[in-house]
Amino acid sequence: MVGGRGRGSNLRALVAEFNGDASVSVVSVIATASDSPALEWAEGQNLRTAAIPPRPSETYASRLLEHLHGVEWICLAGYLNLLPPEVLAAFPGRILNIHPALLPKFGGKGMYGLHVHSAVLAANETVSGCTVHYVSEVYDEGEVLAQATCPVMKTDTPETLAARVLRLEHLLYPEAVRFAIERARA
Ligand code: GRF
Protein backbone atom coordinates (compact mmCIF):
# COMPACT_ATOMS: atom_id res chain seq x y z
CA MET A 1 0.00 0.00 0.00
CA VAL A 2 1.38 3.36 -0.99
CA GLY A 3 0.50 7.00 -0.43
CA GLY A 4 -0.90 9.36 -3.01
CA ARG A 5 2.46 10.87 -3.87
CA GLY A 6 4.43 7.64 -3.56
CA ARG A 7 7.14 7.20 -6.17
CA GLY A 8 6.87 3.46 -5.63
CA SER A 9 10.59 2.77 -5.54
CA ASN A 10 10.20 0.38 -2.59
CA LEU A 11 7.28 -1.24 -4.39
CA ARG A 12 9.55 -1.85 -7.38
CA ALA A 13 12.22 -3.32 -5.09
CA LEU A 14 9.66 -5.72 -3.60
CA VAL A 15 8.28 -6.73 -6.99
CA ALA A 16 11.84 -7.38 -8.24
CA GLU A 17 12.67 -9.47 -5.17
CA PHE A 18 9.67 -11.77 -5.51
CA ASN A 19 9.49 -11.87 -9.30
CA GLY A 20 9.35 -15.55 -10.27
CA ASP A 21 9.37 -16.68 -6.63
CA ALA A 22 7.29 -19.81 -6.14
CA SER A 23 6.24 -19.09 -2.57
CA VAL A 24 5.70 -15.32 -2.35
CA SER A 25 4.25 -12.93 -4.88
CA VAL A 26 3.20 -9.30 -4.92
CA VAL A 27 -0.41 -9.48 -6.05
CA SER A 28 -2.01 -6.17 -5.35
CA VAL A 29 -1.13 -2.50 -5.02
CA ILE A 30 -3.38 -0.05 -3.24
CA ALA A 31 -2.82 3.70 -3.28
CA THR A 32 -4.71 6.44 -1.50
CA ALA A 33 -5.04 8.43 -4.75
CA SER A 34 -5.64 7.44 -8.36
CA ASP A 35 -2.82 9.63 -9.70
CA SER A 36 -0.17 7.96 -7.55
CA PRO A 37 2.95 7.31 -9.68
CA ALA A 38 3.37 3.95 -7.92
CA LEU A 39 -0.11 2.91 -8.98
CA GLU A 40 0.50 3.98 -12.55
CA TRP A 41 3.64 1.84 -12.64
CA ALA A 42 1.84 -1.14 -11.08
CA GLU A 43 -0.93 -0.95 -13.67
CA GLY A 44 1.64 -1.78 -16.34
CA GLN A 45 2.93 -4.79 -14.40
CA ASN A 46 0.00 -7.17 -14.39
CA LEU A 47 -0.67 -6.37 -10.74
CA ARG A 48 -4.12 -5.92 -9.25
CA THR A 49 -4.42 -2.22 -8.47
CA ALA A 50 -6.86 0.01 -6.65
CA ALA A 51 -7.07 3.65 -5.66
CA ILE A 52 -8.85 3.67 -2.32
CA PRO A 53 -9.07 7.15 -0.78
CA PRO A 54 -9.36 7.29 3.02
CA ARG A 55 -12.55 9.34 2.78
CA PRO A 56 -15.31 8.76 3.57
CA SER A 57 -13.69 7.26 6.65
CA GLU A 58 -16.84 5.31 7.62
CA THR A 59 -16.38 2.99 4.67
CA TYR A 60 -12.58 3.02 4.38
CA ALA A 61 -12.01 -0.24 6.27
CA SER A 62 -14.63 -2.19 4.34
CA ARG A 63 -13.41 -0.86 0.98
CA LEU A 64 -9.85 -1.88 1.88
CA LEU A 65 -10.85 -5.31 3.18
CA GLU A 66 -12.88 -6.01 0.08
CA HIS A 67 -9.87 -5.33 -2.12
CA LEU A 68 -7.51 -7.24 0.20
CA HIS A 69 -9.47 -10.45 -0.18
CA GLY A 70 -7.00 -13.32 -0.64
CA VAL A 71 -4.00 -11.19 0.40
CA GLU A 72 -1.85 -12.56 3.25
CA TRP A 73 0.56 -9.72 4.02
CA ILE A 74 0.42 -5.94 3.68
CA CYS A 75 3.60 -3.90 3.06
CA LEU A 76 3.31 -0.15 3.46
CA ALA A 77 5.69 2.17 1.62
CA GLY A 78 5.05 5.87 1.74
CA TYR A 79 1.56 5.29 3.13
CA LEU A 80 0.96 8.27 5.42
CA ASN A 81 -2.36 7.34 7.06
CA LEU A 82 -3.09 5.12 10.02
CA LEU A 83 -4.74 1.87 8.98
CA PRO A 84 -8.25 1.37 10.34
CA PRO A 85 -8.46 -0.97 13.38
CA GLU A 86 -10.53 -3.46 11.33
CA VAL A 87 -7.65 -3.89 8.89
CA LEU A 88 -5.09 -4.25 11.71
CA ALA A 89 -7.30 -6.91 13.28
CA ALA A 90 -7.67 -8.79 9.99
CA PHE A 91 -3.87 -9.01 9.47
CA PRO A 92 -2.40 -9.67 12.93
CA GLY A 93 1.41 -9.56 12.73
CA ARG A 94 1.21 -9.41 8.94
CA ILE A 95 1.53 -5.70 8.20
CA LEU A 96 4.97 -4.14 7.71
CA ASN A 97 6.17 -0.61 7.08
CA ILE A 98 9.49 0.93 6.15
CA HIS A 99 10.58 4.17 7.78
CA PRO A 100 13.59 6.22 6.58
CA ALA A 101 15.28 6.59 9.98
CA LEU A 102 16.40 4.53 12.94
CA LEU A 103 13.25 4.20 15.02
CA PRO A 104 12.33 4.89 17.78
CA LYS A 105 14.05 8.18 16.94
CA PHE A 106 12.64 10.43 14.24
CA GLY A 107 9.26 8.73 13.92
CA GLY A 108 5.65 9.66 14.58
CA LYS A 109 3.01 11.78 12.93
CA GLY A 110 4.47 14.34 10.53
CA MET A 111 7.79 12.50 10.33
CA TYR A 112 7.91 11.60 6.67
CA GLY A 113 9.97 12.47 3.62
CA LEU A 114 12.50 15.25 4.01
CA HIS A 115 11.11 16.18 7.45
CA VAL A 116 12.78 13.03 8.78
CA HIS A 117 16.18 13.73 7.25
CA SER A 118 16.09 17.43 8.26
CA ALA A 119 15.44 16.33 11.84
CA VAL A 120 18.33 13.85 11.73
CA LEU A 121 20.68 16.59 10.49
CA ALA A 122 19.36 19.11 13.04
CA ALA A 123 20.10 16.60 15.80
CA ASN A 124 23.70 16.26 14.56
CA GLU A 125 23.37 12.51 14.22
CA THR A 126 26.39 10.80 12.72
CA VAL A 127 24.49 7.64 11.77
CA SER A 128 21.09 7.24 10.15
CA GLY A 129 19.38 4.45 8.24
CA CYS A 130 16.03 2.79 7.86
CA THR A 131 13.72 0.59 9.89
CA VAL A 132 11.25 -2.12 8.91
CA HIS A 133 8.65 -2.55 11.62
CA TYR A 134 5.32 -4.22 12.26
CA VAL A 135 2.43 -1.79 12.01
CA SER A 136 0.29 -0.96 15.02
CA GLU A 137 -2.39 1.59 15.78
CA VAL A 138 0.26 4.26 16.55
CA TYR A 139 2.49 5.89 13.91
CA ASP A 140 5.90 4.16 13.67
CA GLU A 141 5.56 2.37 17.01
CA GLY A 142 5.14 -1.31 16.16
CA GLU A 143 7.84 -3.88 16.93
CA VAL A 144 11.06 -3.34 14.97
CA LEU A 145 11.86 -6.19 12.60
CA ALA A 146 15.08 -4.98 10.96
CA GLN A 147 17.31 -1.94 10.62
CA ALA A 148 20.17 -0.92 8.37
CA THR A 149 22.52 1.99 8.97
CA CYS A 150 24.53 4.45 6.93
CA PRO A 151 26.78 7.36 7.85
CA VAL A 152 25.55 10.93 7.99
CA MET A 153 28.14 13.17 6.32
CA LYS A 154 28.97 16.67 7.56
CA THR A 155 28.21 17.92 4.06
CA ASP A 156 24.79 16.21 3.84
CA THR A 157 21.63 18.05 2.95
CA PRO A 158 18.23 16.44 3.64
CA GLU A 159 18.19 15.46 -0.05
CA THR A 160 21.60 13.75 -0.12
CA LEU A 161 20.85 11.90 3.10
CA ALA A 162 17.44 10.85 1.78
CA ALA A 163 19.05 9.41 -1.34
CA ARG A 164 21.59 7.41 0.70
CA VAL A 165 18.90 6.05 3.01
CA LEU A 166 16.61 5.20 0.09
CA ARG A 167 19.30 3.02 -1.51
CA LEU A 168 19.48 1.17 1.80
CA GLU A 169 15.69 0.83 1.95
CA HIS A 170 15.68 -0.99 -1.36
CA LEU A 171 18.06 -3.59 0.07
CA LEU A 172 16.53 -3.92 3.52
CA TYR A 173 12.80 -4.02 2.78
CA PRO A 174 12.73 -7.02 0.42
CA GLU A 175 15.05 -8.97 2.70
CA ALA A 176 13.02 -8.12 5.81
CA VAL A 177 9.71 -8.99 4.13
CA ARG A 178 11.08 -12.34 3.01
CA PHE A 179 12.41 -13.02 6.51
CA ALA A 180 9.10 -12.11 8.19
CA ILE A 181 7.06 -14.30 5.86
CA GLU A 182 9.40 -17.28 6.17
CA ARG A 183 9.51 -16.94 9.94
CA ALA A 184 5.73 -16.81 10.17
CA ARG A 185 5.40 -19.91 8.02
CA ALA A 186 8.07 -21.94 9.84
C1 GRF B 1 10.35 5.82 1.76
O1 GRF B 1 11.39 6.69 2.10
C2 GRF B 1 9.83 5.10 2.97
O2 GRF B 1 10.81 4.89 3.95
C3 GRF B 1 8.79 6.05 3.49
O3 GRF B 1 8.20 6.59 2.34
C4 GRF B 1 9.12 6.57 1.27
C5 GRF B 1 8.48 5.89 0.11
O4 GRF B 1 9.29 5.97 -1.03
N1 GRF B 1 7.86 5.38 4.38
P1 GRF B 1 8.93 5.19 -2.35
O5 GRF B 1 7.55 5.63 -2.80
O6 GRF B 1 8.95 3.73 -2.03
O7 GRF B 1 9.98 5.57 -3.33
Image (cartoon, rainbow, N blue to C red):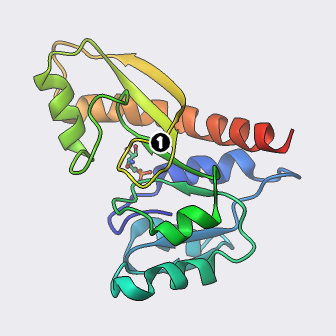
Q: Give the left or right position of residue 115, taking residue 31 as reference.
A: left
- Spot occupied by residue 180 in the image (x, y as percentages of width and height): 69, 39
From what the image shows, is residue 53 above or below residue 121? below
Looking at this view, name the residue that lies furthest to the left. Answer: 122
Indicate the position of residue 11 as horizontal and vertical percent values: 54, 54
- The quadrant where residue 141 appears: top left
Q: Is residue 49 above or below residue 7?
A: below
Q: What element does badge 1 sit on? A: loop
Amino acid type assigned to the residue bearing label 1 in the image? Gly
On the image, numbered disc 1 is attached to which residue?
A: 142
Q: Residue at position x 24%, y 45% from top?
A: 111
Q: Nearer the viewer, residue 177 or 163?
A: 177
Q: Is residue 151 above or below residue 78?
A: above
> Residue at the location (55% across, 68% down)?
87
- The answer to whether residue 171 is left or right of residue 119 is right
Mark 1 crowd level (few <14, some 14–19, many ≥20, 10 Å Cα): some
